[in-house]
Amino acid sequence: ALCSSSAAAWNQILERDRDALMKRTQQRPLVQNHLTVREASIAATLWGITGTGLLYAGTDPITAILGLSNIGLYAGLYTYMKPRSIYNTWVGAVVGAIPPVMGWSAATGGSLLDLDAMILGTTLYLWQMPHFFALSFMHRIDYKRGGFAMLPVLENDGEKTSQVVMRYAAYLSTVPFVA
């Protein structure tokens, strides 16, 4: 939870100007000036260091590396891509797929290449696509207002978005047969 909090805080620091433009994010603490950027940066850093340290001390190095890497992936690449490329969603889905793999690593000490770990990560990755594309279609006006390059923002009829939703739902439906 601390690594996720760190990633979310860094994201809100980096996107505070865009958050101010969107109805669903206008009440965030930085937008409302309840926190300064310095205060948020200190909290984000402490959460990231503490979360990674606890994962290292309480589980194993692989889980700690995954936790730290996910902070960087979310607050770095994903946040950077959101206003620049529709493929940000695919990167964001990787971010969401990593926590169950972290759980697998922490609980079993097994390899990240074990079939069970790959099924967990793949299931979460595939599930996120129809889930998020449906949400982003509902909030497409807000995303457009914030200047984000989401697939639903770039189309009027939702046809491409619905095709992606259906394709990933079909992929997801094959997971029980593989498992």
Image: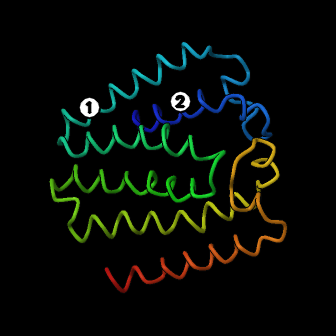
Q: Residue at x 51, y 52 (%)?
A: 92
Numbered disc 1: secondary structure: helix
Where does the N terminus fall, quadrant-wise?
top left
Name the quadrant containing residue 14. top right
Given the image, on which type of amino acid does mark 2 rest? Ala
Where does the C terminus fall, quadrant-wise?
bottom left
The earlier-in-sequence mark between 1 and 2 is 2
Q: What residue is pinned by disc 1?
A: 54
Mark 2 nearby-residue class (10 Å; few <14, some 14–19, many ≥20): many
What x and y, as percent, mark residue 49?
Answer: 33, 25
Q: What residue is pinned by disc 2?
A: 9
What x and y, as percent, mark residue 38?
Answer: 55, 13
110 and 13: which one is in front? Answer: 13
Q: Is residue 30 left or right of residue 156?
A: left
Given the image, on which type of amino acid does mark 1 rest? Leu
| Above or below, comparing residue 108 to residue 60 in the picture | below
What x and y, as percent, mark residue 12?
Answer: 60, 31
